[in-house]
Image (tube, coloured by chain):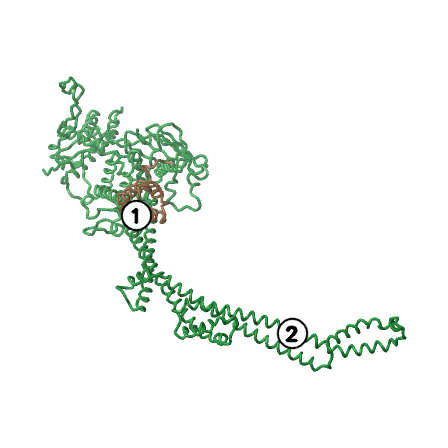
Chain colours: A brown, B green
Amino acid sequence: MCEEAEPKIPSAKLATQAADALLTESLVREKDLEQIRSAFSVGTATAGQWLLWVDLAAEEDDGNE
Amino acid sequence: MSRAIQRLTLRSFRGATQPVEIDLETDKPLVVIFGENGSGKSSLIDAVDFIANGSFGSLMHRSVDGQRHPFLASLGHDLDDIEIGLHTKEGGAWTARLERKHATIERTSDTGELPVVRVLRRAEILDIVEATPAKRYEALGRFIDVSSYEKSEAALREALRNAETSLQLAAARAEQASSSLEKYWEAEGSAGANAEAWARAKAQDAVVELEQREAALKVVKHAVSAVGQRRIEYGRAIGNTRAATRTFSRVRDELTQMPDLEAADVVSLVALLRKATPLVAEGADTTECPLCLQAIPGEELRKSIEDRLSKLDNYVQLADRLSQAEKNSESKVAVLNGAGESLLGALSKLAEATDEAQAELTSNGKALLASLRDTLKTDSEEVTTDAIQAGRRLSIVLSSLSEALITVSSDLAKHNAIRVQHEALLDAKKEGRHQEQLVARLKQAHEIVESIRKAFVDSVLESIGEECKVLYACIHPEESLGSPHLAMHENRPGSVELEGTFENQTNIPPQGYYSESHLDTLGFCVWLAIAKRGKPENTILLIDDVFTSVDAQHISRIVRLISDIANEFAQVIVATHYRNWRDRYRLAYAPGLKAQLLELHSWSLARGISLSSTELAVEELESKLETEPLERQAVASQAGILLEALLDYLTLLYRRRLPRNHENEWTLGDLLSSCRKLFNNLTIERDVQPAEGDGKEAGDGQETVEASVGVAQAITPFYDDMGRLLFLRNQVGCHFNLAGGETSDADVRAFGKATSLLVKSIACHECGQIPSRRRGDHFACTCGKTRMRPLEYTG
């Protein structure tokens, strides 16, 4: 009905910030980043997804080494 | 363009039993609505809340039986008659009605956006200050609610817990496998460096040999079992053959003992007699012999044949039995021969199998098998007694074989168990390493995610807290309590702690130590700090008579604070029953005041809400000066009140000495005496914009704009002008006396004008405020364009 004075607290913005930080530390893969941001910001990320994202990044890391 | 409210209309809403229209001066960011209790202040605030937020306003905080919406309509009016209209400065227009128990808002213009309206009622203050941390979190939720983020963070935490559990399970599996291997290792003599190294070597041993040994033994065992079985069958066949032979002999003997008859003859005779029987059967027509044609004694003949046949039957039956016994004996012999061949076959296979399994047999078993084999190597096509005898020793051989088989199978099972446990150990260790890495990464990820959230929430709360601290210090300068700050509860998500200082104690809960008025101002400051975080330029603040417990000194600071912050918002509307609030504007400001003062009249059912603008005292005085005939008493009295208000203000500001009395009330004479020397030293400096054409011409022919310059002005002349006519205040404005009646209108006008000029000579022409803020060596007004010196005066 009335416009918010500012956007609702930006979970999405925080999610982006967190996802970027995770990528910097190679804790997630770049190819998963968009999915992480999306699920993270709307609160639908599950424990299973987290395990997969982090595990795949670890595999990629091991592969690179 | 501003979203400030330009016009508000109410119809049949709450106290508006008659239509109400209020026009607001949108160039003034602050609107002060004064009204005594029950005059309709909350109805106006609720109307704005209803149209902007769809809220039922103050009704939401009241205990009402049943639903609240029926009480939105004015007494005696229908809910359908409710209508609120709102127009903004930027041209927006909306109408709100109640439909199906809810507010429906209709836009009635194409431009503008509905303003964001934040309403502060006393209930909100309690929510912020005295409510539980969780309730406070709700109040702050709009700024710190990161629930979506927190959900995903919780999922990450769960993932970490899952990985930690998997790590523990892998460690347990490794421990179990290691323990099992340790036992095998110790049982095998603890060879090698450790159980794992031993198991690794053991697992690499070829298992084929063991498997072959086991298979060979199984074959031998099977062959031995087969021999045993064949032997039993053979024995049974021997028994059967012997029995058949004995039967045959016995029948033959019986036949031998029969009368000496040629068997063939007997048979032939019997056959003949049997053929003849029908011929002499009873009833047959046999009166004579067909051969000799002699008469036949039929009856006698028939009986004779039957007797003779009867005697011959025993012989015939015996002959049949002999034949049968002979056949049976032959059959048994054939079976015996077959069983013998089977036994030989089984023995032959056993001989072959034993070659394979020599190494696995016990010495006794080996000897037995050797003996057995030797026996079988006779190449005889018949079963010998030795072979049969050897077969009887098979149970011993079987026992030996079983022992060997158990040993080999046990070795094989142990080998397999070691191999399986070793593989389990390797798997568990590998899984453990994987989970360890995963746990470390998830932990790091969680730390990052959590720290980002905490940093964000803390920064918001810190920012609100810092702003709150500044605002609070404006209302409570140099007091021993304050420094309010907000913080998320460490162990309870969704909870915000409010803490402050009291004397030298820090981090104390204000609710426990602060007075009610301090809590009110604290709640106000938190609310204001929050409101400032949004987009204040689009936000309208409505403050609904919240300062009921605050004393006069603090009210004046609050009034000043609200005046200061009003410019930051689209509009600030204050509703108050506190008359001093109105008077502080009315008496202490000159024209230019950036506030609109409205005064609600007493409410009645017939008249509803009614209101009018309140003039500043100086404006009121000036309008009275223009009226004819001159209201002499009113002018003198008004000028006196204005003068007293000004002097009272200055004595406070400069801490001037006044004669002490019980009521802290002073006469105009006391105030004047106190300020006389001050006025001689008082100067006002104003920023003056250079007039057009006063700019200097630059080299390029363009005129440069000069900055405003400060022009100082002494106040003494204004004070002297007023002072000469001061006696008129008592003579004309306050008391009955003959001298007053002799005073001319011109003198009364002169007194009024001198007072007005004195006030205006001190007040800022831009913001209407008398300078009161300490800035360096002077006092400054709100807009900063007027300065008053000196800062201190003790003369």
Type of amino acid under label 1: Ala
Please state the horizontal and vertical placement of residue B412, each as a whole percent of the image: 38, 65
Q: Residues within 10 Å of mark 1 (few under 14, many from 20)?
A: many
Type of amino acid under label 2: Glu
Q: At 12% across and 29% down in the image, what residue appears?
A: B714
> From the viewer's perspective, is B793 left or right of B610?
left
- Mark linked to residue B190: none
Residue B262 in view here: yes
Q: Quadrant of the C terminus of chain B?
A: top left
Please state the horizontal and vertical placement of residue B93, each as a whole percent of the image: 37, 29
Which one is nearer the viewer's eye here, B741 or B414? B414
For disc 2, the marked residue is: B326
For disc 1, the marked residue is: A58
Which one is nearer the viewer's eye here, B622 or B368? B368
Mark nearest the camera among 2 and 1 is 2
Distance from Cα at disc 2 to Cα at disc 1? 92 Å
Q: Residues within 10 Å of mark 2 (few under 14, many from 20)?
A: some
Residue A9 in view here: no
Asked if badge 2 and badge 1 are on a common chain, one would say no
Please state the horizontal and vertical placement of residue B189, each as a whole percent of the image: 29, 69
Please state the horizontal and vertical placement of residue B496, each as a whole percent of the image: 29, 48
> What element does badge 2 sit on?
helix
What is the chain letter for disc 2?
B
Q: Measured along the vertical axis of the image, is residue B111 above or below residue B312?
A: above
Q: Measured along the vertical axis of the image, is residue B228 above or below residue B501?
A: below
